[in-house]
């Protein structure tokens, strides 16, 4: 590899491990399962603990296999540093754990992954005030900011209703106000969109989803893009201010969010995700073209009341999605006309599988109000724009004809 050359997305990921030196000629980063890391000189151990030289100490804080994955995600997001976690929620929980304290205020999109929504409810019980806003318009975000606001949190394409946040203008607003802007990039992945480009300081990816892609490992990541000036953040402890300010945020998150909180990614999962990441771009091209074809089929069917997919001209944020994203993602949702039993419809599908999870190679389908959004109740569902008949589809890489045929046949039975 020529270090001066700017390689494309896939070339960069495929050859990432080689750039750090190959162990025994192994072209994949080997899976290091040791929990502890020993040194022949005890002084060196002390020096690693004190952060005076790089090195591994204990698996909860870092592992060579996990580091290799962190490096890949960091290259995908073009960040200054990335930390991996056991799950996507582990990464979001680490933000909560390490950056907020009683009295902090958060402005969050109301259109959120269900468990993130639940986490913010937990935060509210601990004296952290969260304002939920319709983030498709920056004006709502601006109106919710208070002097205590510490972070602004949005998703790119919201799961399951596919609302697209006003990403660019929220970035401009945060920059103007010196606020930390956090974007959950899971539904787009760094292949479709880099939140750094709109000024996000921290980027979250649930690696479980399209980056891993095979539904065989859980993982999450948090990337510092370098866009945020940490000297403006009031809650960085002196301990984490020893290096240059660009390092402060991740230093505190590594200690408070990873070491103390403990949602650490294991080396086996890191290996699965790293292998999956090699084909992210290839799989995304296929899932996204399948999703667009399926959205068009559903939109043209008289038994379907509504289809939500940013790739359709009828989607309210189609224009900004076209401008910001390489294509429109693997996630779509739709509503069947009143009187059609969604369970009967789902049971007629033979290719799409009724299951939770997103970004799998297989097409997965789930009735939202009855499952993943059941706990929050009808009122909050309505406030998030979630119809009781909403069905979410995570579109996979099946052959397009098979997928369209499966849905067409199941609709005919309605
Ligand atoms: C799945 C998901 C998460 C959480 O990821 P896990 O690995 O399941 O914990 C967070 N944000 C979004 C947008 C997701 O889809």
Image (cartoon, helix red, strand yellow):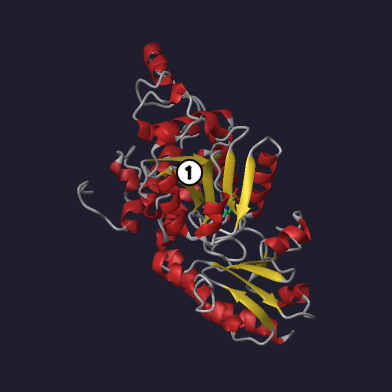
Q: Nearer the viewer, residue 247 or 211?
A: 247
Picture quadrant where residue 300 is located: bottom right
Q: Is mark 1 within 8 Å of ligand 1?
A: no
Q: Nearer the viewer, residue 142 or 228?
A: 142
**Quick one: label 1, few (<14), some, or many (20+) residues within 10 Å?**
many
Estimate the x, y position of residue 226 in percent, counting from the top left: 36, 42
Residue occupying image coordinates x 46% and y 43% = 179
Q: Is residue 235 above or below residue 138?
A: above
Q: Which residue is mark 1?
A: 222
Q: Is residue 370 above or below residue 1?
A: below
Estimate the x, y position of residue 178 in percent, counting from the top left: 43, 42
- Locate the C terminus by quadrant: bottom right
> Quick check: can you spot residue 86?
no
> Quick check: can you spot residue 161?
yes
Left or right: where does residue 52 sit relative to residue 34?
Answer: left
Report helix, strand or loop for mark 1: strand
Left or right: where does residue 17 sit relative to residue 240?
Answer: left
Left or right: where does residue 284 sit relative to residue 101?
Answer: left
Give the total of numbered labels: 1
Residue occupying image coordinates x 58% and y 77% = 403
Estimate the x, y position of residue 108 in percent, counting from the top left: 58, 50
Q: Is residue 127 above or below residue 57?
A: below
């Amino acid at each position: 590899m020529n270090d001066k050359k700017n390689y494309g997305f896939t070339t960069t990921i495929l050859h990432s491990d080689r750039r750090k030196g190959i162990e025994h000629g192994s072209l994949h980063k080997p899976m290091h399962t040791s929990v502890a890391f020993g040194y022949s000189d005890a002084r060196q151990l002390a020096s690693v603990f004190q952060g005076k030289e790089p090195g591994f100490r204990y698996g909860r804080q870092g592992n060579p296999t996990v580091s290799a994955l962190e490096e890949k995600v960091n290259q995908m997001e073009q960040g200054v540093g990335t930390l991996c976690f056991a799950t996507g929620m582990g990464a979001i929980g680490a933000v909560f754990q390490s950056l907020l304290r009683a009295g902090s205020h958060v402005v969050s999109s109301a259109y959120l992954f269900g468990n993130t929504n639940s986490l913010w409810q937990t935060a509210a019980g601990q004296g952290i005030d969260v304002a939920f806003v319709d983030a498709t318009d920056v004006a709502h975000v601006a109106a919710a900011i208070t002097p205590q606001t510490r972070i602004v949190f949005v998703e790119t394409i919201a799961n399951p209703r596919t609302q697209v946040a006003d990403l660019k203008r929220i970035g401009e607003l945060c920059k103007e106000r010196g606020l930390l802007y956090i974007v959950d990039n899971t539904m787009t992945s760094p292949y479709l969109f880099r939140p750094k480009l709109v000024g996000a300081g921290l980027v979250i990816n649930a690696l479980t989803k399209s980056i891993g892609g095979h539904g065989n490992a859980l993982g999450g990541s948090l990337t510092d893009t370098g866009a945020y000036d940490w000297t403006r953040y009031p809650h960085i402890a002196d301990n984490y201010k020893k290096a240059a300010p660009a390092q402060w945020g991740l230093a505190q998150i590594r200690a408070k969010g990873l070491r103390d909180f403990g949602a650490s990614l294991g080396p086996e999962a890191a290996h699965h995700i790293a292998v999956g990441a090699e084909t992210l771009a290839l799989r995304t091209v296929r899932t996204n073209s399948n999703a667009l074809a399926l959205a068009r089929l559903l939109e043209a069917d008289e038994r379907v009341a509504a289809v939500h997919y940013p790739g359709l001209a009828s989607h309210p944020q189609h224009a900004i999605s076209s401008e910001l994203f390489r294509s429109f993602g693997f996630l779509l949702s739709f509503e069947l006309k009143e009187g059609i039993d969604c369970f009967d419809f789902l049971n007629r599908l033979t290719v799409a599988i009724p299951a939770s999870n997103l970004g799998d190679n297989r097409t997965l389908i789930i009735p939202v109000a009855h499952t993943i959004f059941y706990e929050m109740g009808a009122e909050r569902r309505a406030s998030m724009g979630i119809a009781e008949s909403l069905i979410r589809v995570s579109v996979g890489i099946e052959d397009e004809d098979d997928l369209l045929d499966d849905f067409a046949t199941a609709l005919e039975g309605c």
